[in-house]
Image (cartoon, rainbow, N blue to C red):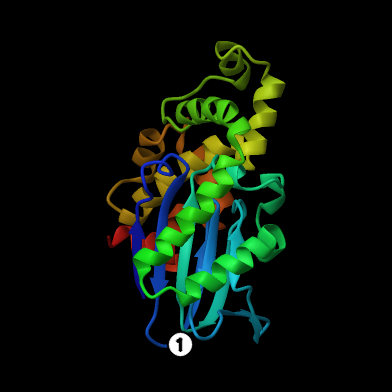
Amino acid sequence: MRYKEFRPNSFLKNHVQCYFVCETDTAVFTEDKVFASGFIEIMFNLGSDGPQQIKNGDLISQPDIQLWGQTIHPFTFASFGKHSMLGIRFFTHTAACFFDEPIEQFNDQVIDFKDIGGKEAVLLHSKLLEAKSLDRRIELLEEFLLQKLLLSANKFNRLKLVNSIMHELARDDFFENINSVASRYGVSSRYLQKIFLNYSGLTPNLFSKIARFQNTLHLVADKDLSLTTIAHKCGYFDQSHFIKDFKFFTGLAPSRFSPESSTDLFVALNN
């Protein structure tokens, strides 16, 4: 499998983490563990045959354009096919600028993006298939995203607030409660919770847990540190809290976890 990431242009860099390509030369079987990452993605299938998900031993055609919402509970995605996927990965809180629908309704789902994007999404997919180069395909993605972004200018002030709070919550040494955070920003805790959920699909507490989990995930995969050291390094009160959260997000204890179970993690460790 070939995987490569590409950075967005200067105007979109604060809203799009990256574009990515995932390709195989032949039809392959993959069984991938998917864990909470904090990101929302859109993936366009550009191959000659669409991805086929395996459910109960049967091949089921998947949408040509897939919207992956926030993953909270771990799941296994088994598929077969010759892959040629072009994707957009949003930051945790920025996908809301490109959709009118509540972001939280996408949680733990892989859905047909045409149901959300309508004719515009279908037209974009058609243009991507016709494009002769990867550079042109990325240009088409950015034209589409910029048009969407210009229509959401009224969200920018709230986006800045969520962005600032998110950076605080992601710190390993962050231990404030949400009431004190809201007070410092001059808003009520109820309002803070509401806009955080609207923009990210996550509560502030759940986002903080996912951010901390992601920090531990790579350390556990490296297998260089003890579980106690990882727990302290990533801001857990003790090892038991770390193990409890890790099992919630992966379904496995850290001692039983293998990085090869997740394509995303395996790619990250080998880049």
4 vs 46: above or below: above
Q: Nearer the viewer, residue 216 or 140?
A: 140
Q: Nearer the viewer, residue 155 or 239?
A: 155
Q: Position of residue 69 (x, y in %)?
A: 61, 54
Determine the residue positioned at 28% across, 62% down: 270
Q: Nearer the viewer, residue 205 or 88?
A: 88
Determine the residue positioned at 39% across, 65% down: 136
Give the class, few, some or many, for how many residues have Cα within 10 Å of label 1's Cα (few <14, many ≥20): few
Question: What amino acid is found at the position of numbered circle 1 in the picture?
Answer: Ala
Could you tell me which quadrant the C terminus lies in?
A: bottom left
Q: Position of residue 87 (x, y in %)?
A: 47, 62
Q: Position of residue 71 (x, y in %)?
A: 59, 54
Determine the residue positioned at 41% across, 88% down: 26
181 vs 247: above or below: above
Count of all numbered marks drawn on residues in the image: 1
The answer to which quarter of the image holds residue 205 is top right
Q: Position of residue 31 (x, y in %)?
A: 51, 75
Residue identifier under label 1:
27
* Residue 112 seen in render: no
Q: Nearer the viewer, residue 61 or 216?
A: 61
127 vs 170: above or below: below
Determine the residue positioned at 31% across, 59% down: 269
Is residue 196 shown left or right of residue 49? right
The answer to which quarter of the image holds residue 193 is top right
* Residue 87 seen in render: yes
- Where disc 1 sits, the SS reads loop
Could you tell me which quadrant the N terminus lies in?
A: bottom left
